[in-house]
Image (cartoon, rainbow, N blue to C red):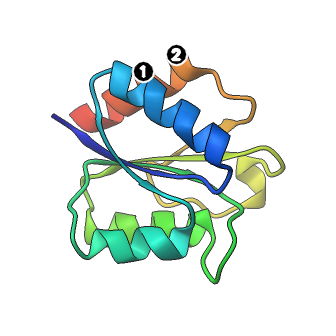
Amino acid sequence: MLKVLVVEDEVLIRLTVIDVLEEAGFEVVEAGSADEAMELLEDHSINLLFTDVQMPGKLSGVDLAKAVAVRFPDAGIVVVSGRLTPEDIDLPHGAEFFSKPYDFKRIVASLNRLSEI
């Protein structure tokens, strides 16, 4: 089973994303900030990352995505934002970007595709 790290600071959004991904057959590890996610990565290996850009704490979702790209070079990365566009941020190579509100069918399809690369 593929493991996805879901990083979203808004609890209701995070729980919705987790429900959708678990129903799609993914194992989910969750964090409410990029800082918390970095701590989780010390104990977990992941196949995929789903992260919002803007987070409380020192690290942004983009910082986290870059760290995951280095530590887990085969991991698929999906970055989302309701305020920024891909042109506003420097994503790691191969990362995919989605705007809010989420199109969950497209996100699940993207995660499945990224897991095959």
At x 37%, y 77%, the residue is 39
- What is the tally of numbered marks visible in this picture? 2
User: Does residue 117 appear anywhere in the picture?
Assistant: no
The kind of residue on which mark 2 rests is Lys
Residue occupying the far top of the picture: 105
Q: Residue furthest left?
A: 1
* SS for callout 2: helix
Left/right placement of residue 46 relative to residue 61 reads left
Image location of residue 12, percent across then percent down: 65, 39
Real-space Cα separation, disc 1 to disc 2, in angstroms: 6 Å
The quadrant of the image that shows the C terminus is top left
| Left or right of 82 in this view: 36 | left
Disc 1: which residue? 109
Furthest residue in direction right, as rendered: 83
Q: Position of residue 15 (x, y in %)?
A: 54, 38
Q: Is residue 47 left or right of residue 14?
A: left
> In what element is the residue under mark 1?
helix
Which quadrant would residue 26 be assigned to in this image? top left
The one nearer the camera, 28 or 78, is: 28
- Kindly identify the residue that appears in the image at 26 percent across and 76 percent down: 42
Residue under the point 20% across and 61% down: 45
Query: Mark 1 touching mark 2, by CB under 8 A?
Result: yes
Relative to 44, 100 lies left or right? right
* Residue type, label 1: Ala
Task: Quickly name the residue at label 2.
Answer: 105
Vertical comparison of 83 with 26: above or below? below
Where's the N terminus, which quadrant?
top left
